Image (spheres, rainbow, N blue to C red):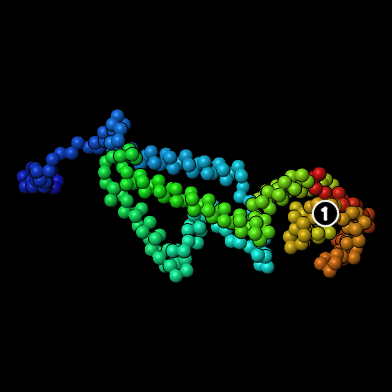
Amino acid sequence: MAHGNNSKEKVVFVGDSRVRKGNGFITPPDYTSYPGKSEAFIPNFLLKEWMVGVVVLVGFLALTIAEPAPLGFPANPSASVIPMPDWYFLFLYQYLKLPYASGSYIVLGTLGVSGVAFGSLLLAPFLDTGSERRFYRRPIASSLMILSLIATIYLTNSAWTHYKAEMAETGQISEDIQREEKAAENKAKGLPTSSATKTKEIAIVDKEDPAMESFKKAGCISCHAADMKGAGGPSLRGVGDKHDKAAIAKIIKEGYEGKMPPQYDNAIAAGLTDKDIDHLAEWLSKQKAEK
């Protein structure tokens, strides 16, 4: 190896002539014309799996946006409730009820059988190393897959059927039916049919009215905020739906149920007149939600 531009310097060649020169990246062959044959894992197979995963993920996201998850009913500790897992765990729920998976055999059912099942899935790529891809040419792997699907469907159906029978015997109504009945009742009344639906924000009525300046001048914003949404105190948006002008004027002069002290003297001290306070009470009584 030479250093600098000295032509008399000894040159030492580093390398091994036995190492063949590479040809760069070799494009994997196309196996699509050979049904049943294998294909290159990278990038062919991996790209296909990635594309399928993206499509499935986008589908799930579309479903969650189109139909928000409903909130459950408040827990009632005194109620007699039959516990029930989500639908994708129903087959395991029913499996754990079987005699050899519960009672004296609970260790065998929870660790033994499940350990063999999941261990088989982990070892499957190492045990099934054949190049054949058609399912009918792989009888052992295909049979195990079909049996697993049949067992999952059977156990899921058994769990749901048994749950319905238990509910009928005890006279209980399942939560999904209660939710559907409540949604139908709310729909008939014109109310939201899902607890996940957000309530529409109530706007300020006549925001440019001079009473708004009286509201700020009297110091009401210290508890109710300048936007009337509340800052330590209750929101005054929609207060007209609860109190009329006379009731609001009384609250200003006498306070409200020990939660709010009288504000009349403070308003007068801030420079408001009785006419301003009367107009403020009238303006607050107009703060109603849109019908």
Residue at 39 percent of width and 60 percent of height: 113
- Residue 194 in percent (x, y) is at 68, 49
Residue at 44 percent of width and 70 percent of height: 104
Identify whether 47 is placed above or below 33: below
Number of numbered discs present?
1
Which image quarter holds the C terminus?
A: top right
Identify whether 132 is placed above or below 86: above
Report the front residue among 55 and 222.
55
Left-right relation of 79 to 8: right
Q: Quadrant of residue 173?
A: bottom right
Residue at 30 percent of width and 39 percent of height: 137
Report the front residue among 200 and 74.
74
The answer to whether residue 208 is seen in the rendering is no
- Residue 106 in percent (x, y) is at 44, 67
Report the front residue among 4 and 122.
122
- Amino acid carrying label 1: it is Val
Left-right relation of 79 to 188: left
- Residue 271 in percent (x, y) is at 88, 59
Q: State the SS at label 1.
A: helix
Name the residue beneath numbered marker 1: 239
* Number of other residues with Cα within 10 Å of mark 1, as a class: few under 14, some 14 to 19, many 20 or more: some
Left-right relation of 223 to 66: right
